[in-house]
Image (spheres, helix red, strand yellow):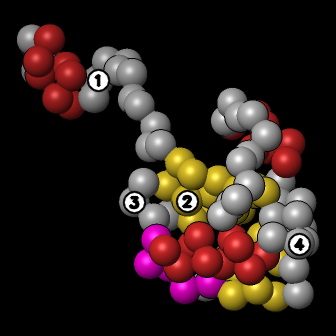
Amino acid sequence: MVNSNYERWRTGSTPQAYTGSPVEAVRVDGTNADDVVTWLETKGLDAANCGGAVEIGHVIADVGSWMVVTASNHVMTLDDATFSEMYEHTPPPLIGG
């Protein structure tokens, strides 16, 4: 029987606020694939330029997609609409410049 606030918190039986992991992201635009690959490699991730798209393992960010890296180096790609819904963002800064 859960009978204290601590026990309810510990067992997850009451709603709690969870803070999401901070992310870094860049939009692949077809001309910046080499810069995106370099950026990923500085994070210790193996990436490749595939004709303007960026590949990392089995994850491919096509032109127009966002390459998103979490604080724990989890990588995902999102289309522009999904990225806009998930994250507040301003136009991304230029990588390396």
Looking at the rendered structure, the kind of residue marked 3 is Ser
- Kind of residue indicated by mark 2: Val
Can you say whether 36 is above or below 58 in the image? above
Q: Which label sits in the foreground, 3 or 1? A: 3
> Helix, strand or loop at disc 3?
loop
Circle 1 Cα neighbour tier, 10 Å, few/some/many (<14 / 14–19 / ≥20): few
Amino acid type for the residue under numbered disc 4:
Thr
Q: Where is residue 54, by image quadrant? A: bottom right
**Mark 2 burial class by Cα count in 10 Å: few <14, some 14-19, many 20+:** some
Report the residue at 75% width, 34% height from top: 90
Q: Nearer the viewer, mark 1 or mark 2?
A: 2
Q: Residue 72 carries which label?
A: 3
Residue 31 % position (x, y): 88, 72
Residue 17 point in image, percent of width and height: 39, 22
Name the element at disc 4.
loop
Image coordinates for residue 38, horizontal then vertical, percent: 61, 77
* Residues drawn in magenta: 43-47
Q: Distance between the residues labelled 3 and 4?
A: 27 Å
**Label 1, on which residue?**
13
Left or right, 4 with reference to 8: left
Residue at the spot of label 4: 31
Decide which of 22, 18 is in the foreground and name it. 22
Label 2 belongs to which residue?
Answer: 69
Q: Which amino acid does label 1 sit on?
A: Ser
Identify which residue is drawn at 14% across, 11% down.
5
Q: Where is residue 2 in the image (x, y as percent from the top left)?
A: 13, 19
